[in-house]
Image (cartoon, rainbow, N blue to C red):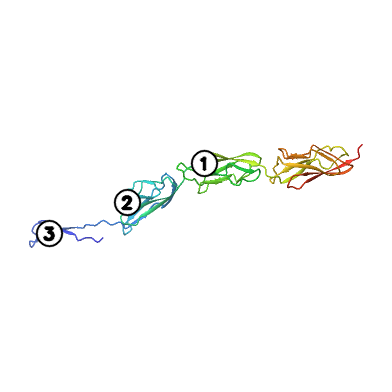
Amino acid sequence: MEPEYCMIRSVRRTLGLLAGGVLMVVSACTETVTPADPSELAAVSATELSGTVGLQVSPAPSVIVRDERGQPLQGVPVRFAVTSGGGTIVGEAAETDSSGVAAVISWRLGRATGVNTLTATVGDLPPVTFTARAIAGWPVTMSRIAGDGQTVIARTPVSVRPAVLLRDVDGNRVSGATVMFEGEGVMGASQITGEDGIATVGGWAPPRVGPARLDVRSGFLFNSFSAIARTGPPAALTKVAGDMQSAPAGTAVARRPEVLVRDAALNLVPGVSVVFAVETGGGTVVNGSQTSNASGASSPSTWILGTVGPQSLSATVSGLPPVVFTATATVPP
């Protein structure tokens, strides 16, 4: 600023008569300077922050005020205000220090995840905005959201993969949390929750027929899923014993022919109708209509060979190719 015209104050003092009777006059002049106006408002601390919901961010937002010559100004009022996110501040009205810097005492983020903003203003200068991303706190609840109570063919993956949702104390979805799925037939047991707070097991194929259970853990949190594993429809019929025997004509073979019934996943299938019938040789099968037992096995009561020579017996399950047993009837002693 240019100095104003100074005010003249005359002070006369008689110093005594000098040669020629001259009187000396002493005058004093003072200069008044007008304080500089704020010209610039800028951030000192980082403007992009992150923190946990409901907690204070660090560092606390701070700004600097300068004049038109770029010099910091002391004693300038600065106003801080939360503009989004629902957080709170302490020290909303601040004043710049000898370095031209003013800071909010603390900024506590809102209770919901997402963007929080805080502005600092000085008069008509463009405001400075601080942005903080509020992330969820520690997970305190784990809930099942998909894949519970399914029925599945044993050894095959369930159609809906079990999934859990983690939330913090404020109900926010928690991302980045490790979740462990534990149980027989688990694939991809270790998972990380996504931005939606959900973790999904890689796959689950209960290996045995009957009730199945899948446990889920994350820190101190625990949950579990249940399923019922059953057998599928018959898909394969195989010989187990009793093939290629010999016995005297008119007598029974030493080992009864036996078959196993399996589904497409190779599970043994009980309760399937199996029919044993003589094909060649003229022999007799006793109790040829059977049902596979709990182990998927089936056999007739006995097979009595016919006339001397080759013999054959078939085992049939509806919809599947039959299997054939052979034997040789020898001359009786």
Identify the secondary structure beneath mark 2.
strand
Residue shown at 34% from the left, 50% from the top: 80
Q: Residue furthest right?
A: 333
The dot on residue 142 is 1
Q: Quadrant of the N terminus?
A: bottom left
State how far apart marks 3 and 1 are (Cα): 94 Å
Q: Position of residue 106 (x, y in %)?
A: 37, 46
Residue 216: image location, x then y, percent: 56, 41
For the residues carrying marks 3 and 2, which lies nearer the camera in this image?
2
* Label number found at residue 78: 2
- Under circle 1, the secondary element is strand
Q: Earlier in the sequence, mark 3 or mark 1?
A: 3
7 left or right, relative to 96: left
Q: SS at mark 3? A: strand
The kind of residue on which mark 3 rests is: Val
Per the image, the residue denoted by label 3 is 25
Residue at screen point 61% across, 41% down: 227
Mark 1 or 2, nearer chain start: 2
